[in-house]
Image (cartoon, rainbow, N blue to C red):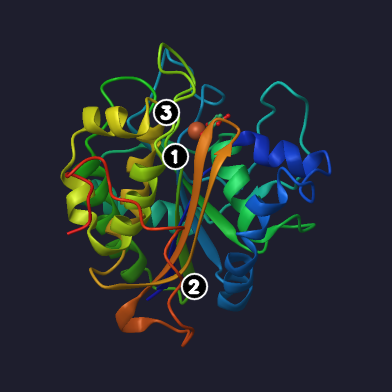
Amino acid sequence: MAKLIGGLGTSHVPSIAAAIDKGLAGTDAWKPFFDGYVPAKEWIARAKPDIAVVIFNDHGNSFFLDRVPTFAVGCAEEYRPVDEGWGPRPIPPFEGAADFSWHLIDTLVDSRFDPMICQEIEVDHGLQVPLELFFGRPEAWPVRVVPIFVNVIQYPIPLPSRCYEMGRVLRQAIESWPGDERVVVIGTGGLSHQLQGSRAGFVNPEADRAFLKDIATDPDRLAAMSRERYVEMFGSEGAELMMWLVMRGAMDRDVVVRHTHYFVPASMTGAGMIVMENAATAEEADPVAPSPGPEAPATDPEVQAA
Ligand code: DHB
Ligand code: FE
């Protein structure tokens, strides 16, 4: 049986990678953002996962709007970072965990989830940036990856509750896998942002802080919210946050929060991060992380902590 050792969530804003590429991570503008990831990087260096299951959305790079799978799972031996138009990035390719990917696909189909199966695909900033945030810039990535693509781009996007259920099946796949790999699940995207339309530039820090709290303590409430409510609360691209529910659904009801961080704005986004372990099998004795910034009352009772 493989072991789920942590559930992580992070924004995947592409300018984070551009800041690293251009040597700007230590500047006044970016340092407070990157400083917040230092404890998470230390946590993952100690935790030593073998496999990272990364839940993210493609942004018109590997799938365009003419063909968008609701859910897709990569089962390749390797995933190259896609060139998003600024030229090839100076990061290594991502080694796949094709054997575990096929087992995950089997488990999903057995559970009446029917994902698209991708034996060859490139991955964009949705996967690249989280790996860079948690692992830095190694010569080779220290984990094998399993990419799970979720359509949060073109309506009809899946229900948040469906994403949460998919996480439960992902957990079953981890626990029915005969290997002894250590697995982290990383939900990516969000937090609040809207990149287009009349609300372009919209961010909602209060709702973001409430989400960072509730994803640990009250995920059922977040899973019960409608898609439209995600768009209203977090912006059209902030609906990416429902992908964190896949990660959360893979975890136990009771979790220990190790680290959180919130920074707004990173580019046009309220950028957040969380590191959780299942309370029953937590491996670290560290104190619980402080809450993400000053307590702010949520503007919406639906996302307000109980
Ligand atoms: C931005 C954020 C995203 O999540 C994304 O996919 C693209 C751009 C931004 O804030 O610039
Ligand atoms: Fe995005």
**Between marks 1 and 2, how big is the CA–CA gap?**
29 Å
Image point (39%, 22%), residue name: 68
Q: Is residue 136 left or right of residue 185?
A: right
Q: Position of residue 233 (x, y in %)?
A: 30, 33
User: What's under tag 1, amino acid-wise?
Assistant: Gly
**Between marks 1 and 3, how big is the CA–CA gap?**
7 Å
Q: Is mark 1 within 8 Å of ligand 1?
A: yes
Q: Position of residue 139 (x, y in %)?
A: 80, 57
- The earlier-in-sequence mark between 3 and 2 is 2
Q: Are marks 3 and 2 in contact (CB under 8 Å)?
A: no
The one nearer the camera, 77 or 81, is 81
Q: Is residue 238 left or right of residue 133?
A: left
On the rendered image, what quadrant is the C terminus found in?
bottom left
Callout 3: few (<14), some (14-19), or many (20+) C-alpha neighbours within 10 Å? many
Task: Write down which quadrant ligand 1 falls in.
Answer: top right
User: What's under tag 3, amino acid-wise?
Assistant: Glu
**Between marks 3 and 2, how big is the CA–CA gap?**
33 Å
Q: Which residue is mark 1?
A: 190
Any part of residue 242 in sight: yes
Q: Nearer the viewer, mark 1 or mark 2?
A: 1
Q: Which residue is mark 2?
A: 181
Q: Which residue is mark 3?
A: 237
Image point (84%, 44%), residue name: 23
